[in-house]
C-alpha cells in the first residue's frame, strides 16, 4: 500500500512539473508574440515617419489589409499612425529653407479613408480636425465621407464639421467631389440616427442643389433632401 502511494505521489509530482513546464512555455511564447508585435509596430512607425511618400502609402496599404482581414492587434497604435499621416503637412509641418517638404495630400486622403473604415470615437475626432484644418478639397471630401461611414454624431460634432467645411467653400467655384461627399455623409449619418436634427443641414443641401455644381451633384443633393424627409 505504501509503495502504491509512493507511485501515485511521484505521478502527481511529474504531472505538476509537466504542467508548470507547459505554462512556462506558453508564457514565453506570449512574451515573444508581444515582442514581435512591438517590432512590427516599430517598423510600421519608421516607414510612416519617413520622408518618402511611397513608404507612407505602403504603410497605409498594410493597415488597410489589417482592417479588411480583421487583424488589428493594437487599435491605439494603428490610430496613432493614421492620425499622424492624416495631419502630416497640415498640423505637423517640416520645412527646409522655408519650403514645406512633407505636404502629401494623397497620403492624408488615404489615411482619412482608413480612419473611416476603422471607426470609433478617436477616429471620428481626428476626421473632424482634418475637416477643419486641411486645405485640400480631395482630403476634405474623403474626411467628410469617412465621418458618414462612421456615423457618430454626438453633440452634432460630425454634422457641424461637415457644414463648416461647406461654408468655407468659394460659392462661385465649389468643388464637385466635396459637394457630393457631403451629400453622401449627411445621408449616411441620417440613416444611422433616424434623421438629422440640425436645420443647417437642410439649408446646406439646398445650397448645393442651387449652386454652380455639375448636374450629378445637384441631383444627389435633391435626392438626399428627399431621403431626409422620410425621417420627419
Image: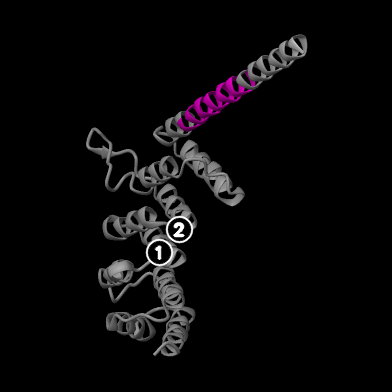
Residue 147's disc is 1
Is residue 26 a member of the stretch shown in magenta? yes
Mark drawn on residue 116: 2
Question: Residue 14: x, y in percent?
Answer: 69, 15
Q: Is residue 169 visible?
A: no
Residue drawn at (64%, 16%) of the image = 17
Q: Neighbour class for label 2 at 10 Å: few (<14), some, many (≥20)?
A: many
Residue range in magenta is 21-41
Q: Which mark is residue 91?
A: none
Give the mark, 2 or 1, whose residue is nearer the N terminus: 2
Question: Between 150 and 21, which is closer to the camera in this rendering?
Answer: 21
Q: Element at badge 1? A: helix
Label 1 near label 2: C-beta < 8 Å? yes
Q: Is residue 82 left or right of residue 125?
A: right
Residue drawn at 38 percent across, 85 percent down: 209
Q: Quadrant of residue 181?
A: bottom left
Q: What is the quadrant of the N terminus in the image?
A: top right
Is residue 120 inside the magenta stretch?
A: no
Image spot of residue 201 (x, y percent): 32, 80
Please say if 174 is above or below 21: below
Residue at image position (42%, 87%) is: 231
Whether residue 174 can be seen here: yes
Whole-percent x, y for residue 194 in the image:
42, 80
Amino acid at each position: 500500500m505504501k509503495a502504491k502511494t509512493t507511485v501515485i505521489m511521484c505521478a502527481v509530482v511529474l504531472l505538476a512539473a509537466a504542467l508548470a513546464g507547459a505554462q512556462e512555455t506558453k508564457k514565453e511564447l506570449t512574451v515573444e508574440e508581444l515582442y514581435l508585435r512591438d517590432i512590427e509596430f516599430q517598423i510600421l512607425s519608421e516607414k510612416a515617419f519617413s520622408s518618402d511618400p511611397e513608404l507612407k502609402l505602403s504603410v497605409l496599404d498594410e493597415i488597410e489589409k489589417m482592417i479588411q482581414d480583421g487583424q488589428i492587434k493594437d487599435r491605439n497604435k494603428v490610430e496613432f499612425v493614421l492620425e499622424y499621416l492624416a495631419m502630416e503637412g497640415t498640423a505637423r509641418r517640416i520645412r527646409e529653407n522655408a519650403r514645406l517638404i512633407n505636404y502629401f495630400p494623397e497620403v492624408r486622403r488615404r489615411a482619412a479613408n482608413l480612419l473611416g473604415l476603422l471607426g470609433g470615437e478617436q477616429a471620428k475626432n481626428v476626421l473632424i480636425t482634418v475637416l477643419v484644418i486641411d486645405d485640400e478639397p480631395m482630403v476634405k471630401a474623403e474626411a467628410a465621407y469617412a465621418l458618414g461611414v462612421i456615423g457618430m454624431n454626438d453633440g452634432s460634432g460630425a454634422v457641424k464639421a461637415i457644414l463648416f467645411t461647406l461654408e468655407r467653400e468659394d460659392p462661385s467655384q465649389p468643388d464637385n467631389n466635396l459637394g457630393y461627399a457631403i451629400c453622401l455623409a449627411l445621408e449616411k449619418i441620417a440613416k444611422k440616427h433616424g434623421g438629422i436634427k440640425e436645420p443647417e443641414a437642410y439649408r446646406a443641401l439646398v445650397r448645393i442643389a442651387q449652386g454652380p455644381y455639375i448636374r450629378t451633384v445637384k441631383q444627389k443633393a435633391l435626392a438626399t433632401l428627399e431621403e431626409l424627409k422620410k425621417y420627419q
